[in-house]
Amino acid sequence: MADDYLAMPIDLQYKLQAAKVDKQKQPQNQTALETQNTDFKSFLKTAEVKEIPQESEVEAKTQAQAQAQDAIAAFKDYMDKTPEERIREMILREMDLTEEQLAAMPPDERLKIEEKIKEKIEEHIKAKAEQKQSDPEKS
């Protein structure tokens, strides 16, 4: 067969050689193509994971930002209050009341509660003053 090959015209030898090379390359090319397809499929899977955030994620972030802003506003409101206003708010909370509920009460009931609040505020102020006198470094 080797003699037959050599007896062929040169251009036929080249064509035969090229056909052999193509046949040898074909499995490699097929393997490379399969690898590329696998790589592309894994890329698509990864890309699906990294999609644009869903509406629920955006809404959750927006809601978290709104809650943070509300907390900051509440803190600023609290810090803007005088010590007496803070004490009054604390006493109302202990009584399970709000300023709105207190305002909606009948005048005689409201007067009684306002008197209790006044007494507790005075007690609190006296206690703070005594604490400062007994231990001036802690104030």
Image (tube, rainbow, N blue to C red):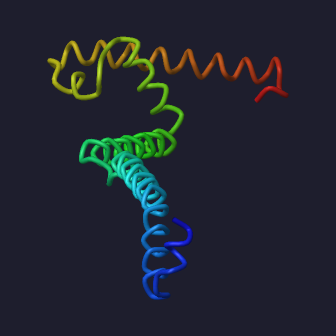
Kindly identify the residue that appears in the image at 83 percent across and 20 percent down: 135
Q: Position of residue 97 (x, y in %)?
A: 30, 17
Q: Position of residue 10 (x, y in %)?
A: 49, 87
Front residue of this view, candidates 81 and 115: 81
Q: Is residue 61 above or below residue 1?
A: above
For residue 123, which quarter of the picture? top right
From the viewer's perspective, is 101 left or right of 16?
Answer: left
Front residue of this view, candidates 91 and 113: 91
Q: Position of residue 73 (x, y in %)?
A: 41, 46
Image quadrant in which the C terminus is located: top right
Front residue of this view, candidates 43 and 17: 17
From the viewer's perspective, is 60 left or right of 7?
Answer: left
For residue 89, which quarter of the picture? top left
* Count of numbered labels shown in the rendering: 0
Kindly identify the residue that appears in the image at 43 percent across and 80 percent down: 15
Q: Is residue 3 above or below residue 115?
A: below
Kindly identify the residue that appears in the image at 24 percent across and 18 percent down: 110
Q: Position of residue 74 (x, y in %)?
A: 41, 40
Q: Is residue 8 above or below residue 53?
A: below
Q: Is residue 19 above or below residue 91?
A: below
Front residue of this view, candidates 41 and 72: 41
Kindly identify the residue that appears in the image at 42 percent across and 71 percent down: 19
For residue 92, which quarter of the picture? top left
